[in-house]
Amino acid sequence: MPRAAAGGRTGRHRLAVAAVRHLSENAVAVTLDVPDALRDAFAHRPGEHVVVRHRHAGAELRRSYSVCPAPDEPDALRLVIKRGAPDGFGAYAMTGLAPGDVLELSPPTGAFALPERPGAHHVLIAGGSGITPLAAMAVTALREDPECRVSLVHSVPRAVDALLCDELAMVKDAFVDRFTVLYVLTREAQDNGPVDGRIDAANLPRLLAALHAAPGPGTTFALCGPGGLVAAVRQALTDRGADPALIRSELFTLGDSPDPTPPPARPARTSPHGTRVTALYDGRHRVVTAQPQDAALLDSLLRDHPDVPYACREGICGSCRAKVRAGQVTTGPQHALDATELAAGYTLTCRARPLTPEVTLDFDA
């Protein structure tokens, strides 16, 4: 899930809304018009996301969304947006967004992807809105690898909540021998499903048996959804012998996982007068002073530079990822960076606090 910036793909761009399609009473698909000059910047692969920034009624609305093109328009820049909070961007998209409106987007970025295993059986498990990156992964894998199989499991409260089910049915028709879709309903009875209720350690063996998906070198897993579902399934797969390197995951919400908290309020080696923070973003340097009372470095930066990238502020989306070029920071609990990236010096500025009198951060790295 980390968000690695690519050369020429930083910054933000204003794009017009080309189409708005209501998928359900609580979700809408928004397609953006990408001009020719920005085709390269907004080229995308399955699993990448964009950050949408929009001002409405005097307030800035900012949110991260996976790119989820329709199966018959794989190159389109389409976002699937749920209603969410009454005052959030999702509610505005459902009720006020229309073709011709302009949104500000960052170029697609991210590292959530299927393990490279030609001819593998890819098992994708989604909870709620986690279907959006996995649907795109499924279609691309089926088209690009004629020897692979894909099994997609979508956990939703009720059948009516299953986003993109009509599009996935068309994909099933196109790849009838290689694509399986199963729905697990948590609040509604179903007659022919292999699992009733939640996908957890108790139900996972029956689900894998139904998919003929025993963990092994020829089976990969991709998980996306609330924190509780992702953590439970990852642990259950590992307990059953799945190679952790063949399990990829991304969170959409913390769900029933414990909320991450920032590091201690006053790290020992910082000055009571504040820390000098230099941030490189989009080729420019910003310099601020982080105060001891600031919850995280992101708060220090946003005080003077609201263009610094971020979205969820919960350590989930990875939009505020930066590399520590000088100094030291402590990164609180987070769900976006893996051990390799942490060892390479990356941090999430929404989770980080300084440990030294001066810190240099590189958002462009």
Image (cartoon, helix red, strand yellow):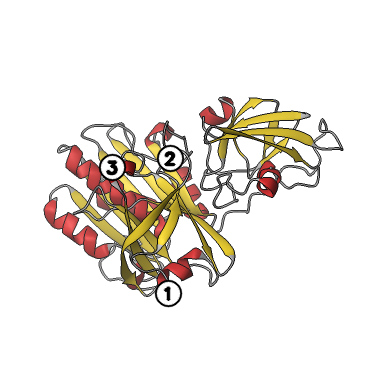
* Residue position marked by numbered label 3 in the rendering: 122
Q: Earlier in the sequence, mark 1 or mark 3?
A: 1
Where in the figure is residue 176, as x and y percent of width and height? 13, 53
326 sits to left or right of 243: right
Of label 2 and label 1, which has the lower sequence position?
1
Helix or strand or loop: what does disc 1 sit on? helix
The residue wearing badge 1 is: 95
Is residue 43 in sight in this rendering? Answer: no
- Res 348 → quadrant: top right
Give neighbour class at mark 3: few <14, some 14-19, many 20+ (Cα, 10 Å): many
| Residue 216 visible | yes
Question: Which corner quadrant of the image does residue 32 belong to?
Answer: bottom left
Name the amino acid type tagged 1.
Thr
Instruction: Using the image as rendered, state which of residue 335 and residue 33 is in the foreground.
Output: 33
The image shows residue 294 at horizontal and vertical percentages of: 75, 46
- CA gap between label 2 and label 1 equals 29 Å
**Mark 1 surroundings: few (<14), some (14-19) or many (≥20) residues within 10 A:** few
Q: Is residue 49 left or right of residue 286?
A: left
* Amino acid bearing label 2: Gly
- Please name the residue that numbered disc 2 is placed on: 110
Q: Is residue 180 left or right of residue 319?
A: left
Q: Which residue is pictured at 74% across the width and 28% down the height?
A: 358
Q: Disc 1 vs disc 3: Cβ atoms closer than 8 Å? A: no
Where residue 350 sits, quadrant-wise, is top right
Image height check: is 288 above or below 27? above
Residue 215 marker? none
